[in-house]
Image (spheres, rainbow, N blue to C red):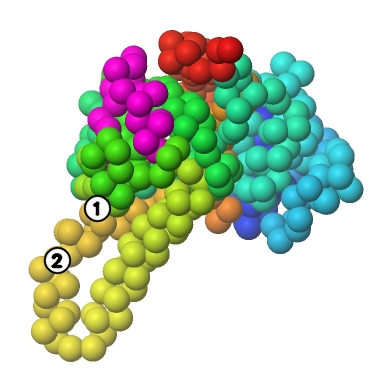
Amino acid sequence: MITVALDAMGGDRGLGATVAGAALLSREDAGVHTILVGDVAAISERLDQVAYEPQRLTVAAADGCVPMGASAGAALDEAPDCSILTAARLVSDGHAQALVSAGHTGATILAASRVFARLPGIRRAALAAVYPTEQRHGPHGDPFALMLDVGATLNATAEDLAAFAVMGSAYSSIISAIDAPRVALLSNGTEPNKGTEAIVAAHQLLKGGSLNFAGNIEGLDIPRGTADVVVCDGFLGNVVLKMLEGVSDVFLDVARSASGRKLQWRMGLAMLGDGLQELKRMTDWKSYGGAPLLGVDQVVIKAHGRSEERAVRNALKVAAKAVRGDLIGRTRSGISALGLGES
């Protein structure tokens, strides 16, 4: 059984979502045990209101949590026994094998960085995110591809980008069941000499290596699904991710607005009904649960701040799947094969 420590106090929806999500998973999956970390009395009160399998859920005490708008460093310093730090320590001490939080992103990254060690050869951690694509990925037709970094490391060196490629490939191979994920560098041209100095140098590091390296791709290739894993620095990745989220939201908002204006538009939207439903399904972040923080020596999944019951359940499932697939071991092997960190 895989044990996952869940920051029960994190997220916009609070205990209502985290407890319900963990309870739902406990009724469905006998292979996952969840430790709900936070205010014991409040968690227990919530558990009394839902159906769950007692043998697959336990509660661990923590003192406070990091508010969503707080400064991550200051909040962790002021509350050393808060839910995210306590949950991380449970993993570090061997009581759990993965950490999940829908709470403050910066606090989750910082807590993981403080409590866990970085893997050998990895200088900076990367926060990955999935995004919808036109092409399907893997044997199960996964409509999502992976992008990293999207905010943990704003300025990345060539070695950082190469490490991101290894980490992203390992994660994609486990979660999307792709034997050899197509890995690409995001640049302003497909030629090997295009991009910043770091991108050009990273291209040389990855070329001819053990990864299924597809070279450089441009921004237009991202939604097409040309690559299974897109590698970039955190500044660029965060901008691109927010743009992709905004485009899908605007498209759906425009469709809803148009449906109430003219009969012709309503008729046209009715004809596009199946396509709009597919777009909605593809852009539904609840279905994938969360995004991994890669580079530390433990499995960390950051769920969306707005996660509700189903999204929390899926984040816990993803964490357990990453543990079962030996994400950390595969990453170690990939980093070693690429020769990163060698003097």
Eye-nearest disc, 1 or 2: 1
Mark 1 vs mark 2, CA separation in Å: 24 Å
The quarter of the image holding the N terminus is top right
- Judge by depth and name the residue closer to the eye, 42 or 179: 179
Q: Callout 2, which amino acid?
A: Leu
Check disc 1 and report its element: helix, strand or loop: loop
N-terminal of the pair, mark 1 or mark 2, is 1
Circles 1 and 2, Cβ within 8 Å, touching? The answer is no
Q: Residue tagged by mark 2?
A: 272
Percent position (x, y) of residue 2? Answer: 58, 19
Check disc 2 and report its element: helix, strand or loop: loop
* Magenta extent: 199-217
Q: Residue at x 40, y 31 (%)?
A: 201
The answer to whether residue 287 shows anywhere in this view is: no
- Judge by depth and name the residue closer to the eye, 264 or 162: 162
- The disc placed on residue 220 is 1
Q: Residue at x 83, y 35 (%)?
A: 61
Percent position (x, y) of residue 335? Answer: 49, 17
Percent position (x, y) of residue 91? Answer: 70, 23
How crowded pointer 2 is (Cα within 10 Å; few <14, some 14-19, many 20+) is rated as: few
The quarter of the image holding the C terminus is top right
- The disc placed on residue 92 is none
